Image (spheres, grey):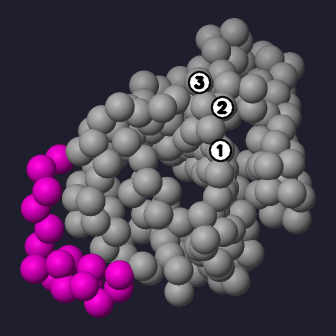
Amino acid sequence: DPAAAMRRILLLAASAHALTTSSRRRFGLGAASAASAAALAPAQPAAAVREGSTKSGLRFRVEVEGSGDTPKRGQNAMIDYVLRVGVDGKPPLYVDGTKQYGLQARPLQFTLGVGAQIPGFDEAVLDMRVGETRTVIVPPKLGYGANGTEGFDDKIPKDATLIYTLELKSLLPFAPTDAQQKWIAENPNPWEK
């Protein structure tokens, strides 16, 4: 049951966050650090507006519904994100993100749907609206696959499930380059390969 699997993964992510927060307190890193860690907490399952999955196997849970525009392939978007990695049923671990302990969130600019990101990231964001926050579970085939990021930065193990918390902050004017337009035409649905 995909909905039950989504709830289990979200609960694992929440458990991992709770362990991180309690560990920070135990090692005397203070309430301010614990409060900063709370900003990284995955959304609680009860707050979902809707959830679903795609034909490719991507699963998502919308926490805050957006009311703005939906991005187009080749468009640049400003996104806040937190990336956690799950392997072999262990609690997901924080890997990367624009929200980090003790620092103010700094959205990053991404060009969407032109092969610059992993297919699962593109597919997830292209389905969002500005202002939306969602948790996305990206299976290995839509992420870094059997190799992970081995030989690059080694942060993502092979066959890892990626868990993103994404917030689509804004869209920049639509102006894909010629090379991006060509790639879009040659790869109509790269996440469904």
Left or right: where does residue 186 sit relative to residue 190? Answer: left
Nearer to me, 145 or 45: 45
Locate residue 15 relative to residue 114 in the image: left or right.
right
Q: Residue at image x 14%, y 68%?
A: 176
Query: What's the residue type where badge 2 is placed?
Result: Ala
Near mark 3 (Cα within 10 A), the count class, few <14, some 14-19 or many ≥20, is: some
The x and y percentages for residue 49 are 61, 31
The magenta stretch spans which residues?
Answer: 172-188
* Residue 107 is at least partly visible in this image: no
Q: Secondary structure at mark 3?
A: helix
- In the rendered image, which residue does mark 3 sit on? 39
Q: CA distance from mark 2 to mark 3?
A: 17 Å
Query: Quick check: is 102 in the magenta stretch?
Result: no
User: Tag count in the figure?
Assistant: 3
| Mark whose residue sits in front, 2 or 3 | 2
- Tell me the SS state at disc 2: loop
Q: Which residue is mark 1?
A: 51
Three-letter code for the amino acid on which mark 3 is drawn: Ala
- Residue 159 x, y percent position in the rendering: 74, 75
Query: Per the image, is 181 magenta?
Result: yes
Density class for disc 1 (Cα within 10 Å; few <14, some 14-19, many ≥20) is: some
